[in-house]
């Protein structure tokens, strides 16, 4: 994969530029970006359309065609999406909604892992696919088992170790972190839009996935927020305010009766963050 792959579908439905507060975005803010013939949604989660037998999930068809990533930014993005999926699973377990857990674990185990597997080997990261597989098997057979949390913790620790294999200079770079974070948020925006039909959340799993991506993206930003605030106070303020506003679209792991924000508003907030990297 010769270049960072971005979600092309994100801005196709927008005809007007969305502004946040008093700040106006550039007129070309929503131009689609042509890259390779595959979009980021095929590698990760954006625009997940039609996943085989899992009709309830609406959008996840392309993920199975994942290519291996070849940059640290894409590697970080995929690991971040894994974290987001598992955060959603943990919230559902905590809420006692065990029947909704398995789909969120299937994606890291069955789809995302393969795209980073070669880089894990290159970086000397211990393989953790078996742990994800055990977690997925248990999520399908006994999601209310006490062992679920142990396996979730092990999986999260393994993903954290894989992230720690990225050079420290990059992990401490606001630009590097924000580039990966924005890709996660673009996937969240695409999931959010795909979850909505007739002004209701028709695809609950996609709503939950998008919430997990946003929560982890916010968590990731905190690792460089102080440095960003020193180097670019105005940009930091826009990012912080945009993240706070963005999170209001996902008030809880279970979707609200009607969407709190229109997809265009979500896309606009993501763009505000991107333009302040």
Image: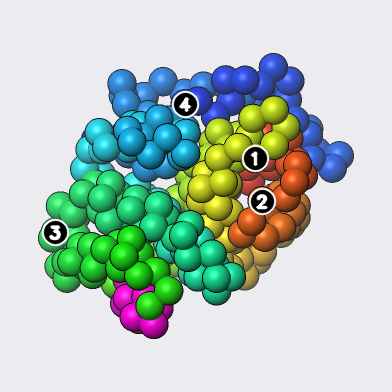
Q: Quadrant of residue 76?
A: bottom left
| Image height of 231 relative to 193, above or below | below
Helix, strand or loop for disc 2: loop
* Res. 201 mark: 1
* Res. 8 mark: 4
Label 3 sits on residue: 122
Helix, strand or loop for disc 1: strand
Asked if the residue at tag 4 contacts the one at tag 1, i.e. Cβ–Cβ closer than 8 Å, the answer is no
Q: Nearer the viewer, mark 1 or mark 4?
A: 1
Dot 3 or dot 4: first in sequence order is 4
* Cα–Cα gap, marks 1 and 4: 23 Å
* Cα–Cα gap, marks 3 and 2: 40 Å
* Cα–Cα gap, marks 3 and 4: 29 Å
Dot 1 or dot 2: first in sequence order is 1
Nearest the viewer among 246 and 261 is 261
Asked if the residue at tag 2 contacts the one at tag 1, i.e. Cβ–Cβ closer than 8 Å, the answer is yes
Q: For the view shown, which residue lies furthest in the top direction?
A: 15
Q: Nearer the viewer, mark 4 or mark 2?
A: 2
Please tell me how crowded label 3 is: few (under 14), some (14-19), or many (20+) other residues with Cα within 10 Å.
few
Helix, strand or loop for disc 3: helix
Tell me the residue at 21%/43% (across/down).
68
* Res. 47 mark: none
Instruction: Give the magenta part as a residue range.
Output: 146-156
Q: Quadrant of residue 133?
A: bottom left
Q: What secondary structure is the stretch in magenta mostly built from?
A: helix
* Res. 255 mark: 2
Dot 3 or dot 2: first in sequence order is 3
Q: Nearer the viewer, mark 3 or mark 4?
A: 4
Tell me the residue at 79%/40% (across/down).
20
Residue 37 position in % (x across, y down)? 31, 21
| Image height of 13 relative to 169, above or below | above
């Amino acid at each position: 994969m010769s270049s960072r792959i971005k979600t092309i579908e994100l801005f196709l439905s927008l005809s007007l530029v969305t502004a946040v507060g008093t700040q106006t975005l550039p007129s070309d803010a929503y131009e689609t970006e042509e890259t390779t013939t595959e979009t980021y949604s095929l590698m990760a989660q954006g625009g997940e359309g039609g996943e085989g037998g899992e009709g309830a999930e609406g959008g996840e068809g392309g993920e199975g065609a994942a290519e291996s990533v070849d940059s640290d930014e894409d590697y970080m993005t995929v690991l971040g999406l894994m974290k987001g999926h598992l955060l959603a699973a943990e919230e559902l377990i905590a809420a006692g909604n065990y029947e909704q857990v398995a789909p969120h674990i299937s994606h890291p185990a069955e789809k995302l892992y393969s795209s980073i597997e070669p880089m894990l080997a290159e970086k000397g990261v211990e393989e953790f696919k078996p742990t994800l597989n055990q977690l997925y098997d248990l999520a399908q057979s006994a999601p209310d088992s006490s062992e679920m949390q142990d396996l979730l913790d092990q999986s999260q620790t393994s993903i954290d170790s894989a992230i720690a294999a990225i050079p420290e200079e990059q992990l401490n770079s606001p630009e590097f972190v924000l580039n990966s974070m924005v890709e996660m948020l673009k996937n969240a925006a695409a999931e959010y839009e795909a979850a909505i039909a007739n002004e209701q959340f028709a695809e609950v799993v996609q709503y939950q996935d998008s919430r997990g991506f946003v929560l982890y993206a916010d968590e990731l930003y905190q690792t460089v927020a102080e440095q960003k605030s020193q180097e670019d106070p105005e940009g930091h303020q826009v990012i912080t305010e945009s993240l706070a506003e963005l999170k209001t679209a996902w008030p809880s792991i279970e979707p609200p009766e009607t969407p709190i924000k229109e997809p265009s508003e979500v896309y606009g907030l993501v763009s505000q963050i991107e333009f302040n990297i």
